[in-house]
Amino acid sequence: MDIVLIVIVTLFAGLVYLLRSAIKKQHKKISSVEYAVIIGYILSLAISGVGLLTHSSQYHEAVDPVDGACYLPFGGKHALSLFLYFVAFNCAVLAIWIKGRKIPPIPLVLALIILMLGTIISLFVLAQVSYHDTSTLSIYVGNEGTFYFIFTPIFCFCFGVGFIWKVIQEERETSCLRTYRNPTLNRINKLLSSKFDYPVWALILLVPFFLVITAILILFGQDSDSMAKVFTETSTWAFSQKMHPPILDHQGHYLCTVAAKGDPAVVKPLRLGKRHGNTIIVNRQLLIANAFEEILSDLSPILHRYVRSFYDRYGYNISVKINTVSASNLTYRIMKPLEYIFLFFLYLYYVEPEKKIARQYT
């Protein structure tokens, strides 16, 4: 998790610095539309970063969905290949956005090759993250997680198509105005201007360039088919071909911990109850909180799902740290104001609120 966060922050900061430096050096004026696109793209990267914080597990790892853990849409070992193309793609976009066709021929052709490859890869990434089968992760419902990842490949695809078209138009205008004394060269120039010159060369060199990059990646420990495995050696996503292990059994509810470990004179345990087939000690605070959760579930199932996910994710981490009587007593007292708020809503929505409370964990 820490490594993922470091990579996200480093990439984000690097792109922002590179963008700022390049614009400053070229004295380029940015239109309001370009500002909006840049902000949107940076936001898409930030949203993807948030997604990677919870979708960071490899297909062979058992996860606890209650803690918010889920599977990465890209095979971890092979992610270096995808990351390399992503960085190269952004550099190519930046170069052509700032300088257009005013780049030496060889770097321009390389930039166009990278744009073409990046555009194709963006389509595969978009297809991969557009479908997330969470049926095997019981706490999740529907196509969870796709929201985090779909925006960046959409931006990248639009960048690729847009900047390739930009070079085509600029090269066509330049070639049509260019003439040579030699009639043969002149005929070739006219032919190339009608065929868009540099993009044609980029298309011709696309496969050789891809093979060279693959060979370089192999030297860094990647497989020859890493660009395929980065999508297939995953679990629960569109191109996934791996099945994950059974999900981990979640260990509890932090208010259960409070009721069990607190001073009886303070937390006031009432009786034993059943939760997920396990016997637990319950107090009135726990019963009221669970009854309120049912109200939330009835009023807004979507809001309840997100609140429950947040509550379980952080509540479990809190429960692990509640190991003493004093810690349980303190947690009970901190929760008292919320308990009264929950009780107010129970008396507001139910005709017999105490019966609703008494039925919890029976």
Image (tube, rainbow, N blue to C red):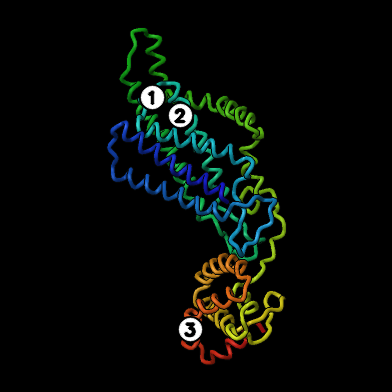
The Cα atoms of the two marked residues, 2 and 1, are separated by 10 Å
Disc 1 packing (10 Å; few <14; some 14–19; many ≥20) = few
Q: Is residue 84 left or right of residue 163?
A: right
Q: Position of residue 290 (x, y in %)?
A: 57, 79
Q: Amino acid at mark 2?
A: Ala
Label ID, residue 103: 1
Residue at the location (52% across, 67% down)? Answer: 306
Do the residues bearing badges 2 and 1 touch, measured as CB atoms within 8 Å?
A: yes
Q: Which mark is residue 340?
A: 3
* Towards the viewer: 61 or 38: 61
Q: Is residue 108 left or right of residue 358?
A: left
Q: What kind of element bears circle 1? A: loop
Q: Which residue is mark 2?
A: 111
Residue 70 placed where, x, y %?
61, 56
Earlier-in-chain disc, 2 versus 1 = 1
The three-letter amino acid code for the residue at tag 3 is: Tyr
As drawn, the residue found furthest toward the bottom would be: 352
Q: Residue at x 53, y 47 (%)?
A: 126
Q: Is residue 283 left or right of residue 23?
A: right
